[in-house]
Image: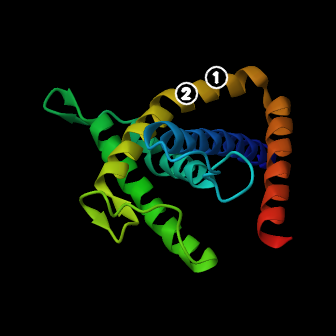
Amino acid sequence: MKEKVINKIFEMFLFFYIVSVIGWIYEVFLEVVVYRWGFSNRGVLFGPYCPVYGCGALAMIICLGWLMERKIRLFKLNITPLLVFIGIVIVTTTIELISSYIMEFTVGSFMWDYTRFSFNFQGRIALNPSIRFGIGGMVILYVLYPLFKKVINYLGTRKTNIISGSLAFTMVIDFLFTFVI
């Protein structure tokens, strides 16, 4: 039983890492291609990952995984995906708001400014990015996570744990060099 829990932790860390890298790519793409501001490292650490995206993915799995498995109908229409979308928007927006306060407390500011968007709160959260996070969350939960599970089953526990442990080690070193040393 203890071994299963440890393996699940390694598996979830690997998914956290993958989504963190995808989040970093998304942020850099927006900055370089969409807004044409030029490149800057969009993460709080040196490496190419935004841990807040990984945290969001894990929070979505934990908070909404049970909902995805249900078939909630309104008359004959399955509204489960709509409810999951709304849940994703709530979860990710809450994480973004909390992250902005944590960043402001620890480093003096947060890395984004949504004041240019309608329906924003202190420039920390806004409707437009929240909807985008909802769409991205649907892709993560309904496409990436099932694909990830297939790859994990293919790799097996040993390889998954080795890959996950190696990536965790590099992220811890990155954290130490960024915030401690």
Image coordinates of residue 78 in percent, x first then y, are 24, 30
Asked whether 161 or 75 is in front, the reply is 161
Quadrant of the rendered structure where residue 90 is? Answer: bottom left
Circles 2 and 1, Cβ within 8 Å, touching? The answer is: yes
Residue depicted at x 84% and y 44%: 165
Q: Which residue ends up furthest to the top in the rendered image? A: 154
Q: CA distance from mark 2 to mark 1?
A: 6 Å
- Residue 150's image quarter? top right
Q: Residue 123 is drawn in which quadrant? A: bottom left
> Badge 2, how many Cα within 10 Å: few under 14, some, many 20+?
few
Amino acid on which disc 2 is placed: Pro
User: Which x, y percent locates residue 14?
Assistant: 71, 40
- Left or right: residue 160 versus residue 37 is right
The residue positioned 34% from the left and 42% from the top of the image is 85
| Image point (31%, 47%), residue name | 86
Q: How is the image coloured?
A: rainbow
Front-most of residues 82 and 171 = 171
Rendering coords of residue 161 (x, y %): 82, 38
* Residue placed most toward the observer, 55 or 113: 113
Residue 55 got which mark?
none
Q: Nearer the viewer, residue 75 or 137?
A: 137
Where is mark 2, residue-wise? 146
How far across and how far down the image is residue 45, in percent? 71, 57
Query: Counting other residues with Cα less than 10 Å from the Cα at mark 1, is it few (<14), some (14-19), or many (20 or more)?
Result: few
Q: Secondary structure at mark 1?
A: helix
Q: Amino acid at mark 1?
A: Lys
In-image side of 39 versus 59 (left or right): right
Residue 174, relative to residue 69: is it above or below? below
Most extreme residue toward the left is 75
The quadrant the C terminus occupies is bottom right
Element under label 2?
A: helix
Q: Which mark is residue 150?
A: 1
